[in-house]
Image (cartoon, rainbow, N blue to C red):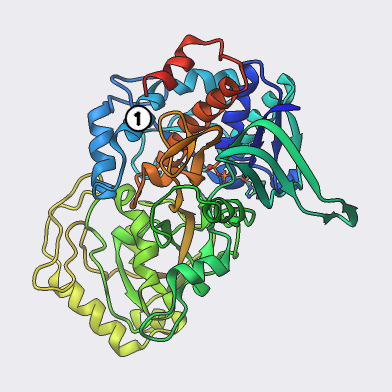
Amino acid sequence: MIDVLVIGGGNAALCAALMAREAGASVLLLEAAPRAWRGGNSQHTRNLRCMHDGPQDVLLEAYPEEEFWQDLLKVTGGQTNEKLARLVIRASSSCRGWMRRHGVHFQPSLSGALHTARTNAFFMGGGKALVNAYFRSAENLGVQIRYDTPVADIELQDGRFVAAHVPAREVRGRPLPAERIEARTCVLAAGGFESNRQWLREAWGQNERGEWPSDNFLIRGTRFNDGVLLRRMIEQGADTIGDPTQAHMVAIDARAPLYDGGICTRIDCVSLGVVVNRDGQRFYDEGEDFWPKRYAIWGRLVAHQPGQVGFSIIDQKALGRFMPPVFPGATADSLEALAGLLGLPVQAFLETVHAYNRACQVGTFDHTRLDDCHTVGLEPVKSHWARPIDTPPYYGYPLRPGVTFTYLGLRTDETAAVHFDKRPSPNLFVAGEMMAGNVLGKGYTAGVGMSIGTAFGRIAGTSAAAAAGYEHPEKENRHDCATA
Ligand SMILES: Cc1cc2nc3c(=O)[nH]c(=O)nc-3n(C[C@H](O)[C@H](O)[C@H](O)COP(=O)(O)OP(=O)(O)OC[C@H]3O[C@@H](n4cnc5c(N)ncnc54)[C@H](O)[C@@H]3O)c2cc1C
């Protein structure tokens, strides 16, 4: 019988598989996606947030534990488990050596990449290169990997993992029979439920305008994170954490594909201009804080607007100050013409922009700090980087909510055990998006998804191997789990 069964093929699953294998356990990894689409949302990532007390290879200055913790506390509004959060933070300071040993390379932050040169270590080649490196290393170490293998159910006995069930299916025209796969221990790392449109509909419901908002959401990442296992675990009494409507949601280009649009569909010029809804009205302070601390609230803000659509408007002065998105914006030499191109009510749009322009106070524009360019007498206010939109050409990008990942997950502890009735399972563990809600009840700070997945993936793999009778050889890794 296999010692450790890992379900999922993203960062958390791969970290778990590698750790369990390093400990000496036999490991089988089941990935729902075909090989070409392996790697889940992790294939779309660029970086992870790292604590460090001084400059370190690709990271500038220092980002101490306390600052990381305060950032997390702020964005979650306190909806975080401090013990588990600090465990993630501390693990983020020491995991890169291990990542390098498995083939991950780092590079300095790109300019324009959300001001993250101090806090985030960027993967050379992005998340795709990271998952490819991990898969390669896992294969070399003897981890068995099966693609096109979506697990539909988990068989349990008194909170103990017994077997995973894979339904009969057809893979590229070849019928495959149903399977029951037993293992001594199991790690669940199958992502959130962001690609399950029916579940999103249930969670978001119908709004006062009779709309089903989630029908207009786009999914930034993989189509394979449909939450089937999360739902089965909840139905079987696993303890949960988080609110099903909470998710990392970014405003992305409305022309992005339904799935897997990835990073290049994000619209990063919001803080440099104004955002209006389909009625031509502004609805939120575009300059509230630095973009890395605010980008993840804009998906939700747009989700609450009529038709779940918004329009990011800038003028020529903003060019070169943000990472250009993949689709070019609508461009016009007058605001009237821009409104026409975007299908906005011309009069209402002009009134909004003119009122905004009049309210902008002359200051010293500086996009690298919270500058003094703000509006006066305008509702909603624009707190920073407020400069009149008056220099053609004008640009407009249509926005839709882009779901990155959902936060409803399984409650866990410092060993990554799944809990039933507050009691930890002896052989079932969880990592990544499936438990991220323990650390991230709401909000987001760039790069913490991979910090959580790396820390808990490694812990889950170590715990699963230990439950099967194998101790990880590196003291440091046993220490990660034992002192968490
Ligand atoms: C566009 C985009 C950019 C992002 N950028 C960053 C970033 O730069 N930094 C950062 O920290 N975070 C980023 N994130 C968030 C990050 O991707 C996640 O936090 C992280 O990848 C989660 O890892 P995971 O292993 O839990 O899930 P995933 O990587 O999504 O892996 C889940 C895996 O489970 C598989 N699976 C699902 N259901 C089943 C099933 N029933 N049976 C078998 N397998 C199943 C999937 O196919 C997939 O392989 C980004 C996300 C997106 C979408």
Q: Quarter of the image holding residue 50?
A: top left
Residue 447 seen in this snapshot:
no
Q: Position of residue 215 (x, y in %)?
A: 52, 74
Q: Position of residue 464 (x, y in %)?
A: 58, 27
Q: Within the displayed image, which quadrant is ligand 1 positioned in?
A: top right
Q: Looking at the picture, does residue 421 appear above or below residue 122?
A: below
Quadrant in the picture for the N terminus: top right
Residue 450 seen in this snapshot:
yes
Q: Residue at x 52, y 11 (%)?
A: 474
Q: Residue at x 41, y 71 (%)?
A: 396
Mark 1 lies on a secondary structure that is helix
- Mark 1 nearby-residue class (10 Å; few <14, some 14–19, many ≥20): many
Q: Residue at x 54, y 23 (%)?
A: 462
Give the side of residue 225 with respect to residue 324, left or right.
Answer: right
**Tag 1 residue:** 89
Amino acid found under the numbered disc labelled 1: Ile
